[in-house]
Protein backbone atom coordinates (compact mmCIF):
# COMPACT_ATOMS: atom_id res chain seq x y z
CA UNK A 1 0.00 0.00 0.00
CA UNK A 2 2.93 2.31 0.64
CA UNK A 3 4.02 1.89 -3.00
CA UNK A 4 0.50 2.81 -4.15
CA UNK A 5 0.53 6.00 -2.06
CA UNK A 6 3.75 7.08 -3.76
CA UNK A 7 2.61 6.10 -7.29
CA UNK A 8 0.62 9.26 -8.12
CA UNK A 9 3.40 11.50 -6.78
CA UNK A 10 5.88 9.71 -9.04
CA UNK A 11 3.63 10.13 -12.12
CA UNK A 12 3.13 13.85 -11.40
CA UNK A 13 6.89 14.36 -11.09
CA UNK A 14 7.61 12.47 -14.34
CA UNK A 15 4.92 14.26 -16.37
CA UNK A 16 5.76 17.77 -15.17
CA UNK A 17 9.43 17.15 -15.94
CA UNK A 18 8.84 16.55 -19.68
CA UNK A 19 9.42 19.37 -22.17
CA UNK A 20 8.72 17.58 -25.45
CA UNK A 21 6.01 15.32 -26.81
CA UNK A 22 8.48 12.49 -27.37
CA UNK A 23 9.50 12.63 -23.70
CA UNK A 24 5.86 12.60 -22.66
CA UNK A 25 5.26 9.54 -24.85
CA UNK A 26 7.98 7.66 -22.96
CA UNK A 27 6.43 8.62 -19.63
CA UNK A 28 3.05 7.39 -20.89
CA UNK A 29 4.57 4.01 -21.75
CA UNK A 30 6.35 3.86 -18.37
CA UNK A 31 3.17 4.29 -16.36
CA UNK A 32 0.27 3.32 -18.69
CA UNK A 33 1.86 0.65 -20.88
CA UNK A 34 1.18 -3.08 -20.54
CA UNK A 35 4.18 -3.42 -18.26
CA UNK A 36 3.74 0.03 -16.77
CA UNK A 37 3.51 0.92 -13.11
CA UNK A 38 -0.30 1.10 -13.03
CA UNK A 39 -0.89 -2.31 -14.61
CA UNK A 40 1.88 -3.80 -12.43
CA UNK A 41 0.16 -2.45 -9.33
CA UNK A 42 -3.13 -3.99 -10.45
CA UNK A 43 -1.47 -7.38 -10.98
CA UNK A 44 -0.08 -7.22 -7.45
CA UNK A 45 -3.59 -7.15 -6.02
CA UNK A 46 -3.28 -10.90 -5.35
CA UNK A 47 -0.64 -10.14 -2.72
CA UNK A 48 -3.00 -7.82 -0.83
CA UNK A 49 -5.03 -9.28 2.04
CA UNK A 50 -8.54 -10.14 0.86
CA UNK A 51 -10.21 -7.57 3.11
CA UNK A 52 -8.07 -4.76 1.68
CA UNK A 53 -8.30 -5.70 -2.02
CA UNK A 54 -11.44 -3.65 -2.76
CA UNK A 55 -10.00 -0.45 -1.33
CA UNK A 56 -6.68 -1.16 -3.06
CA UNK A 57 -8.33 -1.60 -6.49
CA UNK A 58 -10.42 1.57 -6.07
CA UNK A 59 -7.32 3.54 -5.15
CA UNK A 60 -5.42 2.32 -8.24
CA UNK A 61 -8.34 3.24 -10.53
CA UNK A 62 -8.61 6.71 -8.99
CA UNK A 63 -4.89 7.24 -9.52
CA UNK A 64 -5.24 6.05 -13.13
CA UNK A 65 -8.07 8.52 -13.86
CA UNK A 66 -6.29 11.49 -12.31
CA UNK A 67 -3.01 10.62 -13.98
CA UNK A 68 -4.70 10.26 -17.40
CA UNK A 69 -6.28 13.71 -17.08
CA UNK A 70 -2.96 15.20 -15.98
CA UNK A 71 -1.08 13.62 -18.89
CA UNK A 72 -3.62 14.83 -21.48
CA UNK A 73 -3.59 18.37 -20.08
CA UNK A 74 0.21 18.46 -20.27
CA UNK A 75 0.09 17.07 -23.82
CA UNK A 76 -2.18 19.90 -24.99
CA UNK A 77 0.08 22.46 -23.31
CA UNK A 78 3.12 21.08 -25.15
CA UNK A 79 1.23 21.12 -28.48
CA UNK A 80 0.21 24.78 -28.02
CA UNK A 81 3.74 25.71 -27.02
CA UNK A 82 5.15 23.98 -30.10
CA UNK A 83 2.69 25.88 -32.31
CA UNK A 84 3.77 29.23 -30.87
CA UNK A 85 7.44 28.47 -31.36
CA UNK A 86 6.99 27.25 -34.95
CA UNK A 87 8.68 29.55 -37.44
CA UNK A 88 6.77 30.93 -40.44
CA UNK A 89 8.32 31.48 -43.84
CA UNK A 90 6.69 34.72 -45.01
CA UNK A 91 7.99 34.18 -48.55
CA UNK A 92 5.68 31.17 -49.08
CA UNK A 93 2.50 31.83 -51.10
CA UNK A 94 -0.71 32.23 -49.12
CA UNK A 95 -3.48 29.67 -48.97
CA UNK A 96 -6.39 30.12 -51.37
CA UNK A 97 -9.66 29.50 -49.59
CA UNK A 98 -12.97 28.99 -51.42
CA UNK A 99 -15.28 32.00 -51.27
CA UNK A 100 -18.87 32.72 -52.12
CA UNK A 101 -20.45 35.44 -54.22
CA UNK A 102 -23.59 37.51 -54.51
CA UNK A 103 -26.74 35.94 -55.90
CA UNK A 104 -27.17 36.60 -59.63
CA UNK A 105 -30.36 38.62 -58.92
CA UNK A 106 -28.26 40.96 -56.74
CA UNK A 107 -25.84 41.39 -59.64
CA UNK A 108 -28.77 42.18 -61.95
CA UNK A 109 -30.19 44.78 -59.54
CA UNK A 110 -26.81 46.47 -59.27
CA UNK A 111 -26.36 46.55 -63.05
CA UNK A 112 -29.88 47.90 -63.68
CA UNK A 113 -29.39 50.61 -61.05
CA UNK A 114 -26.15 51.81 -62.67
CA UNK A 115 -27.75 51.92 -66.14
CA UNK A 116 -30.50 54.27 -64.97
CA UNK A 117 -28.18 56.32 -62.76
CA UNK A 118 -26.39 57.40 -65.96
CA UNK A 119 -29.54 59.18 -67.18
CA UNK A 120 -30.42 60.84 -63.87
CA UNK A 121 -32.75 58.34 -62.15
CA UNK A 122 -32.52 57.91 -58.39
CA UNK A 123 -32.76 54.48 -56.76
CA UNK A 124 -35.57 53.97 -54.24
CA UNK A 125 -36.96 50.93 -52.42
CA UNK A 126 -40.44 51.07 -50.95
CA UNK A 127 -42.15 48.69 -48.57
CA UNK A 128 -42.97 45.01 -49.18
CA UNK A 129 -45.98 45.04 -46.82
CA UNK A 130 -48.46 47.59 -48.13
CA UNK A 131 -52.04 48.83 -47.78
CA UNK A 132 -54.74 48.25 -50.39
CA UNK A 133 -55.14 51.95 -51.10
CA UNK A 134 -51.52 52.41 -52.24
CA UNK A 135 -51.54 49.18 -54.27
CA UNK A 136 -54.91 49.73 -55.95
CA UNK A 137 -56.96 52.91 -55.36
CA UNK A 138 -53.97 55.22 -55.79
CA UNK A 139 -53.37 53.48 -59.13
CA UNK A 140 -56.90 54.08 -60.42
CA UNK A 141 -57.93 50.49 -59.61
CA UNK A 142 -61.48 50.47 -58.15
CA UNK A 143 -62.91 47.94 -55.70
CA UNK A 144 -63.96 44.74 -57.47
CA UNK A 145 -61.11 44.90 -60.00
CA UNK A 146 -59.87 41.36 -60.89
CA UNK A 147 -56.32 42.16 -59.81
CA UNK A 148 -57.59 42.56 -56.23
CA UNK A 149 -58.88 38.99 -56.09
CA UNK A 150 -57.50 36.51 -53.53
CA UNK A 151 -56.19 34.42 -56.42
CA UNK A 152 -53.96 37.29 -57.56
CA UNK A 153 -52.82 38.85 -54.28
CA UNK A 154 -51.44 37.69 -50.91
CA UNK A 155 -53.62 39.37 -48.28
CA UNK A 156 -52.46 39.43 -44.65
CA UNK A 157 -54.65 38.55 -41.67
CA UNK A 158 -54.56 41.98 -40.05
CA UNK A 159 -57.15 44.48 -38.90
CA UNK A 160 -58.06 46.63 -41.96
CA UNK A 161 -57.41 50.34 -41.82
CA UNK A 162 -60.65 52.40 -42.09
CA UNK A 163 -59.13 54.53 -44.86
CA UNK A 164 -56.38 52.43 -46.45
CA UNK A 165 -58.15 49.05 -46.44
CA UNK A 166 -56.58 45.62 -46.02
CA UNK A 167 -52.90 44.88 -45.50
CA UNK A 168 -51.12 42.80 -48.14
CA UNK A 169 -47.78 41.75 -49.58
CA UNK A 170 -47.29 44.29 -52.33
CA UNK A 171 -48.13 42.71 -55.72
CA UNK A 172 -46.13 45.33 -57.66
CA UNK A 173 -43.72 48.18 -57.15
CA UNK A 174 -46.26 50.57 -58.68
CA UNK A 175 -47.49 51.43 -55.17
CA UNK A 176 -44.24 53.38 -54.84
CA UNK A 177 -45.41 55.88 -57.48
CA UNK A 178 -47.85 57.59 -55.13
CA UNK A 179 -45.37 57.56 -52.26
CA UNK A 180 -42.60 59.05 -54.41
CA UNK A 181 -44.81 61.85 -55.78
CA UNK A 182 -45.87 62.75 -52.25
CA UNK A 183 -42.30 62.51 -50.96
CA UNK A 184 -40.98 65.00 -53.52
CA UNK A 185 -44.10 67.12 -53.58
CA UNK A 186 -43.41 68.57 -57.01
CA UNK A 187 -41.86 67.35 -60.30
CA UNK A 188 -39.39 66.75 -61.88
CA UNK A 189 -39.39 63.09 -60.80
CA UNK A 190 -37.02 60.39 -62.07
CA UNK A 191 -37.23 57.29 -59.92
CA UNK A 192 -36.29 53.62 -60.13
CA UNK A 193 -38.07 51.74 -57.35
CA UNK A 194 -36.64 48.24 -56.72
CA UNK A 195 -38.28 45.87 -54.26
CA UNK A 196 -39.61 42.36 -53.66
CA UNK A 197 -43.15 41.69 -54.86
CA UNK A 198 -45.52 38.79 -54.32
CA UNK A 199 -48.08 36.99 -56.49
CA UNK A 200 -49.40 33.38 -56.24
CA UNK A 201 -47.91 32.20 -59.56
CA UNK A 202 -45.41 29.38 -60.15
CA UNK A 203 -44.26 28.21 -63.59
CA UNK A 204 -41.30 28.44 -65.98
CA UNK A 205 -41.53 32.24 -66.14
CA UNK A 206 -43.10 33.09 -62.72
CA UNK A 207 -42.21 32.66 -59.05
CA UNK A 208 -44.41 33.71 -56.08
CA UNK A 209 -41.76 36.08 -54.69
CA UNK A 210 -39.84 38.10 -57.24
CA UNK A 211 -38.20 41.47 -57.68
CA UNK A 212 -39.53 44.35 -59.75
CA UNK A 213 -38.05 47.65 -60.80
CA UNK A 214 -40.45 50.52 -61.35
CA UNK A 215 -39.54 53.47 -63.52
CA UNK A 216 -41.35 56.77 -63.02
CA UNK A 217 -40.66 60.01 -64.91
CA UNK A 218 -42.89 63.06 -64.39
CA UNK A 219 -42.20 66.56 -65.70
CA UNK A 220 -43.54 69.15 -68.10
CA UNK A 221 -43.82 68.03 -71.73
CA UNK A 222 -43.11 64.32 -71.15
CA UNK A 223 -44.51 62.11 -73.95
CA UNK A 224 -44.38 58.59 -75.43
CA UNK A 225 -41.21 59.28 -77.43
CA UNK A 226 -39.35 59.82 -74.14
CA UNK A 227 -40.81 56.55 -72.83
CA UNK A 228 -39.80 54.49 -75.86
CA UNK A 229 -36.36 56.08 -76.01
CA UNK A 230 -35.67 55.28 -72.35
CA UNK A 231 -36.75 51.63 -72.63
CA UNK A 232 -34.78 51.18 -75.84
CA UNK A 233 -31.71 52.69 -74.15
CA UNK A 234 -32.08 50.26 -71.25
CA UNK A 235 -32.56 47.24 -73.53
CA UNK A 236 -29.44 48.02 -75.56
CA UNK A 237 -27.35 48.61 -72.43
CA UNK A 238 -28.53 45.53 -70.54
CA UNK A 239 -29.16 42.95 -73.27
CA UNK A 240 -26.80 44.11 -75.99
CA UNK A 241 -27.14 46.00 -79.29
CA UNK A 242 -28.52 42.99 -81.20
CA UNK A 243 -31.69 42.61 -79.12
CA UNK A 244 -34.90 44.34 -80.22
CA UNK A 245 -37.93 45.59 -78.29
CA UNK A 246 -41.50 46.27 -79.32
CA UNK A 247 -44.46 48.04 -77.70
CA UNK A 248 -47.85 46.37 -77.95
CA UNK A 249 -51.03 48.35 -77.18
CA UNK A 250 -52.59 47.05 -73.96
CA UNK A 251 -54.76 48.18 -71.07
CA UNK A 252 -53.65 49.03 -67.54
CA UNK A 253 -55.77 50.97 -65.07
CA UNK A 254 -52.89 53.23 -64.05
CA UNK A 255 -51.62 54.28 -67.50
CA UNK A 256 -53.27 55.73 -70.61
CA UNK A 257 -52.25 54.90 -73.27
CA UNK A 258 -50.79 51.60 -72.10
CA UNK A 259 -48.36 49.12 -73.66
CA UNK A 260 -46.71 45.81 -72.97
CA UNK A 261 -42.98 45.70 -73.70
CA UNK A 262 -41.54 42.64 -75.47
CA UNK A 263 -37.95 41.74 -76.28
CA UNK A 264 -36.60 39.13 -78.66
CA UNK A 265 -36.01 35.88 -76.76
CA UNK A 266 -32.43 35.16 -75.74
CA UNK A 267 -33.00 31.40 -75.77
CA UNK A 268 -34.31 31.01 -79.33
CA UNK A 269 -32.95 34.33 -80.68
CA UNK A 270 -36.45 35.46 -81.64
CA UNK A 271 -37.22 32.45 -83.83
CA UNK A 272 -39.65 30.73 -81.43
CA UNK A 273 -37.94 27.33 -81.84
CA UNK A 274 -34.91 25.55 -80.35
CA UNK A 275 -33.53 22.50 -82.17
CA UNK A 276 -36.74 22.19 -84.17
CA UNK A 277 -38.96 22.32 -81.08
CA UNK A 278 -41.08 25.15 -79.74
CA UNK A 279 -39.14 27.39 -77.35
CA UNK A 280 -40.03 26.37 -73.77
CA UNK A 281 -39.74 29.92 -72.43
CA UNK A 282 -41.18 32.35 -74.98
CA UNK A 283 -43.21 30.03 -77.26
CA UNK A 284 -43.17 32.60 -80.12
CA UNK A 285 -39.85 34.44 -80.31
CA UNK A 286 -40.79 37.33 -78.02
CA UNK A 287 -40.84 37.54 -74.24
CA UNK A 288 -42.91 40.03 -72.29
CA UNK A 289 -40.75 42.13 -69.99
CA UNK A 290 -43.54 44.11 -68.35
CA UNK A 291 -46.08 46.86 -68.66
CA UNK A 292 -45.64 50.53 -69.39
CA UNK A 293 -47.51 53.64 -70.50
CA UNK A 294 -48.27 57.28 -69.79
CA UNK A 295 -49.29 57.85 -66.17
CA UNK A 296 -53.07 58.14 -65.86
CA UNK A 297 -54.29 61.63 -64.83
CA UNK A 298 -56.09 60.15 -61.81
CA UNK A 299 -52.82 58.64 -60.57
CA UNK A 300 -51.11 62.01 -60.89
CA UNK A 301 -53.93 63.70 -58.97
CA UNK A 302 -53.79 61.16 -56.14
CA UNK A 303 -50.04 61.85 -55.93
CA UNK A 304 -50.65 65.59 -55.62
CA UNK A 305 -49.48 66.43 -59.17
CA UNK A 306 -51.59 68.57 -61.53
CA UNK A 307 -52.16 66.55 -64.78
CA UNK A 308 -52.96 69.79 -66.63
CA UNK A 309 -49.42 71.02 -66.03
CA UNK A 310 -47.41 67.82 -65.85
CA UNK A 311 -47.32 64.48 -67.62
CA UNK A 312 -45.28 61.35 -67.08
CA UNK A 313 -44.64 57.74 -67.94
CA UNK A 314 -44.08 54.63 -65.86
CA UNK A 315 -43.08 51.02 -66.36
CA UNK A 316 -42.76 47.91 -64.21
CA UNK A 317 -40.39 45.05 -65.11
CA UNK A 318 -39.54 41.84 -63.23
CA UNK A 319 -35.83 41.63 -62.42
CA UNK A 320 -35.75 37.83 -62.68
CA UNK A 321 -37.56 37.83 -66.02
CA UNK A 322 -35.31 40.56 -67.39
CA UNK A 323 -32.24 38.68 -66.19
CA UNK A 324 -33.44 35.41 -67.73
CA UNK A 325 -33.22 37.13 -71.12
CA UNK A 326 -29.61 38.20 -70.58
CA UNK A 327 -27.48 37.55 -73.67
CA UNK A 328 -25.80 34.13 -73.54
CA UNK A 329 -27.55 32.95 -70.37
CA UNK A 330 -30.28 30.96 -72.14
CA UNK A 331 -32.22 30.37 -68.93
CA UNK A 332 -35.44 28.60 -69.92
CA UNK A 333 -36.92 28.16 -66.41
CA UNK A 334 -36.88 31.08 -63.98
CA UNK A 335 -37.49 28.82 -60.97
CA UNK A 336 -33.91 27.56 -61.01
CA UNK A 337 -32.85 30.95 -59.59
CA UNK A 338 -34.38 29.99 -56.23
CA UNK A 339 -34.16 26.20 -55.98
CA UNK A 340 -30.78 26.33 -54.21
CA UNK A 341 -28.94 24.02 -56.65
CA UNK A 342 -25.29 24.72 -55.85
CA UNK A 343 -24.20 23.39 -59.27
CA UNK A 344 -26.09 26.28 -60.84
CA UNK A 345 -25.36 28.95 -58.22
CA UNK A 346 -21.58 28.45 -58.15
CA UNK A 347 -21.35 29.43 -61.82
CA UNK A 348 -22.02 33.02 -60.75
Image (spheres, grey):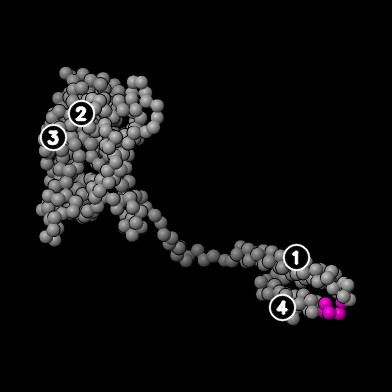
Occupied quadrant, residue 161 = top left
CA–CA distance between discs 2 and 1? 81 Å
Is 151 part of what is drawn in magenta?
Answer: no
Occupied quadrant, residue 294 = top left
Contact flag, marks 1 and 4 (Cβ < 8 Å): no
Q: Secondary structure at mark 2?
A: loop
Occupied quadrant, residue 74 = bottom right
Q: Secondary structure at mark 1?
A: helix
Q: Establish if 37 lies above or below 193.
A: below
Observer able to see residue 308: yes
Q: Which of disc 1 and disc 2 is earlier in sequence?
A: 1
Q: Which of disc 4 and disc 3 is earlier in sequence?
A: 4
Q: Secondary structure at mark 4?
A: loop
Q: Describe residue 13's horizontal placement relative to residue 274 as left or right.
A: right
Judged from this view, the residue extending furthest toward the bottom is 35
Q: Describe residue 87's horizontal placement relative to residue 306 as left or right.
A: right
Give the residue number, with chain letter if any, for mark 1.
66
Give the residue number, with chain letter if any, for mark 2.
254
Is 47 part of what is drawn in magenta?
Answer: yes
Give the residue number, with chain letter if any, for mark 4.
33
Contact flag, marks 2 and 3 (Cβ < 8 Å): no
Q: In the image, what residue occupies the spot 32% across and 36% down? A: 154
Give the residue number, with chain letter if any, for mark 3.
250
Q: Which of disc 3 and disc 1 is earlier in sequence?
A: 1
Q: Which residues are magenta?
A: 44-48
Contact flag, marks 2 and 4 (Cβ < 8 Å): no
Q: Position of residue 116 (x, y in %)?
A: 24, 38
- Assess disc 2: are there few (<14), some (14-19) or many (≥20) residues with their C-alpha within 10 Å of its C-alpha: many
Amino acid sequence: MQDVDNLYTEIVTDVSGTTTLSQLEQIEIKHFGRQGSINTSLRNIKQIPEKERKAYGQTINEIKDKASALLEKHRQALIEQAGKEKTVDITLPGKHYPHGSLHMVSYAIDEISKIFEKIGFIRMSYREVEWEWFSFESLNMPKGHPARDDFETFFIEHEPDPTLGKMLFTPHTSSGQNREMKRLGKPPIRMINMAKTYRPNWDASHVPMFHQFEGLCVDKGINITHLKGTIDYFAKQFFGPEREIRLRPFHFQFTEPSFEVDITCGVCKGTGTVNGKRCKLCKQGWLELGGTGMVHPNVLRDGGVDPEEYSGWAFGFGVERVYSMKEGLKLDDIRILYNGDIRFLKQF
